[in-house]
Image (cartoon, rainbow, N blue to C red):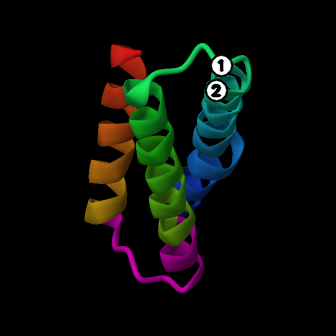
């Protein structure tokens, strides 16, 4: 499997699902009226992050990311996931 394919699978099968789950949790907090301005800001940031990853998938589909870029993105994703 190429590094581009590995990144594509990571985004499709893990990252987007995790982001969508978190967005759902934020919507539940907002719906329960237990939110504050920080929750709404976090929701907006997560929606932007989701859009960024969807754009990355398009770039991967169009072969616009080289191996080095893909490796850097994978490392950044792994770091983000460790922090959570």
Does 56 sit above or below residue 7?
A: below
Are the residues flagged by discs 1 and 2 in contact, CB closer than 8 Å?
Answer: yes
Give the labeled residue for mark 2. 30
Any magenta on residue 20? Answer: no
In this figure, what is the number of numbered marks? 2
Identity of the residue drawn at 48% across and 77% down = 59
**Of residues 37 and 18, which is closer to you in this image?**
37
What's the magenta region? 57-67
Any magenta on residue 61? Answer: yes
Q: Residues within 10 Å of mark 1 (few under 14, many from 20)?
A: few
Identity of the residue drawn at 34% across and 73% down = 66
Identity of the residue drawn at 45% across and 61% down = 52
What is the x, y in percent for residue 44? Answer: 46, 46
What is the x, y in percent for residue 14? Answer: 64, 37
Q: Quadrant of the N terminus?
A: bottom right
Give the labeled residue for mark 1. 33
The Cα–Cα distance between marks 1 and 2, rounded to whole angstroms, is 5 Å
Identity of the residue drawn at 37% across and 59% down = 70
Q: Quadrant of residue 74?
A: top left
Does 29 sit above or below residue 45?
A: above
**Of residues 54 and 3, which is closer to you in this image?**
54
Q: Quadrant of residue 31?
A: top right
What is the x, y in percent for residue 82? Answer: 37, 17
């Amino acid at each position: 499997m190429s590094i581009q394919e590995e990144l594509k699978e990571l985004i499709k099968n893990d990252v987007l699902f995790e982001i969508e789950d978190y967005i759902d949790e934020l919507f539940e907090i907002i719906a329960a009226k237990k939110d504050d301005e920080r929750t709404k800001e976090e929701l907006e940031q997560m929606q932007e992050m989701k859009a960024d990853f969807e754009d990355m998938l398009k770039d991967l589909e169009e072969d616009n990311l080289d191996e080095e870029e893909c490796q850097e993105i994978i490392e950044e994703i792994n770091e983000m996931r460790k922090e959570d």
